[in-house]
Amino acid sequence: MTLILALHSTWRAARAPLLAALVTLLAWATPASAQHAGLRTLVVPGAEPVTVALFYPSPAVARTQPMGPWRPQVTPGAPVAAAPLKGLVLISHGTGGHELGHHNLATRLAADGYLVAALRHPGDNWEDRSMITSGRYFSERPRQVSRVLDALLASPEWGPRIPAERIAAVGHSAGGYTVLALAGAQAEPARAAQHCRSVSDDPGFCSLGKLSSAQGTNGTNGAHSPVASASSAVGPLDGPLVSVADPRIRAVVALAPMAVVLTPQSLAAITVPVKVVMAERDVVLQGKYHGQHVAAHLPRADTSTVPGAGHFAFMAQSVWPLVSDAGDAAANPEGFDRVAYHATLENQVAEFLGRQWR
């Protein structure tokens, strides 16, 4: 009996701090578990306005919203959650893409507590590809992301809430190039033509860019090709290095990146954390020339390959065919379940970002 009374007394003494700790833990965990994704549209003004889909944490229950070929789980115009933001994630789509093309990843990160800004690249989207022959493709794409970042940091609503040390960028295909360039990688225009003159097993990249011969200067018109007429897009093939790093970007995720144009020296000099994910059955960008080029010169990168995946595996599953010069972006290789894979992708990206900012 004495032992029982002693144990009871000890438990009563210990119970108060334990309960206090539990209440604190629940108070921290509950907002995240109750959060969903709200959606707004932001237009960054300028000579070339940038349309941005803003996904953000919200207490409003999200529902499936038909938006063209996409079915995001969001609540348009929902109130913003009161909890502090975990960080800001910028998303860069592939050539000919759309700001909703990665809505699945964006909504997951928003529900986790991030502000996510997915931009529609002016002059390189599903409606307008004029930038491809402008002579400033490699330089302007990353600068457009930086313009969006400028606008958000200057915003009275969002700027004070964004943790400056927790800003990341995620990009697919040409967007993968874009985020690597923001991390400090430099494009050398001559590398694209040299590559396509010296190899015969990267036909997707070289035919889309019309780089199989030294005189290839005609662009393509389809959506989602990783590079179109790179020789005309970047100007003279012996032009200077393209350097457009943004030191505010503290981590990047490159999905099936277009990377053969990046110099080994600049890749090796990247200091921010980098995650590279390639697709095993990518016939648009051969991983050994692109993603593995990054891995070879940036051994610190977290690099992996998705078994059975095609180039478009990282995009949200469209309910319509999305036909392009690079193939149907809504189609999947036989046996590959894109929707099932996205749960893994979302977890991996969230965990990668979480590791950087513990």
Image: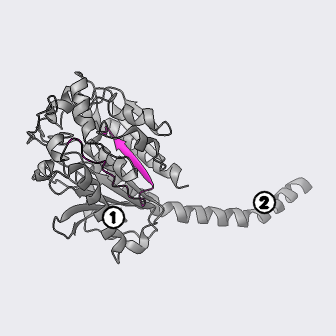
Q: Check the image and report above or below for 208 versus 184.
A: above
Residue 257 shown left or right of residue 27 in the figure: left
Residue denoted by label 1 = 149
Specify the amino acid type for callout 2.
Trp
Packing grade of label 2 (10 A; few <14, some 14-19, many >=20) is few
Element on which disc 2 rests: helix
Where residue 151 sits, quadrant-wise, is: bottom left
Between 176 and 230, the residue placed more toward the observer is 230
Specify the amino acid type for callout 1.
Leu
Q: Check the image and report above or below for 76 versus 215.
A: below
Counting every numbered tag in the picture gives: 2
Image quarter where the N terminus lies is bottom right
Packing grade of label 1 (10 A; few <14, some 14-19, many >=20) is many
Determine the residue located farthest toward the bottom in the rendered image: 156
Q: Position of residue 26 (x, y in %)?
A: 55, 62
Region of the chain picked out in magenta, as a range? 237-257
Q: Position of residue 227 (x, y in %)?
A: 19, 40
Magenta stretch prevailing secondary structure:
loop
Q: Earlier in the sequence, mark 1 or mark 2?
A: 2
Where residue 324 sits, quadrant-wise, is: top left
Q: Check the image and report above or below for 23 versus 123.
A: below
Is there any visible trace of residue 166 in the rendered image?
Answer: yes
Residue denoted by label 2 = 11
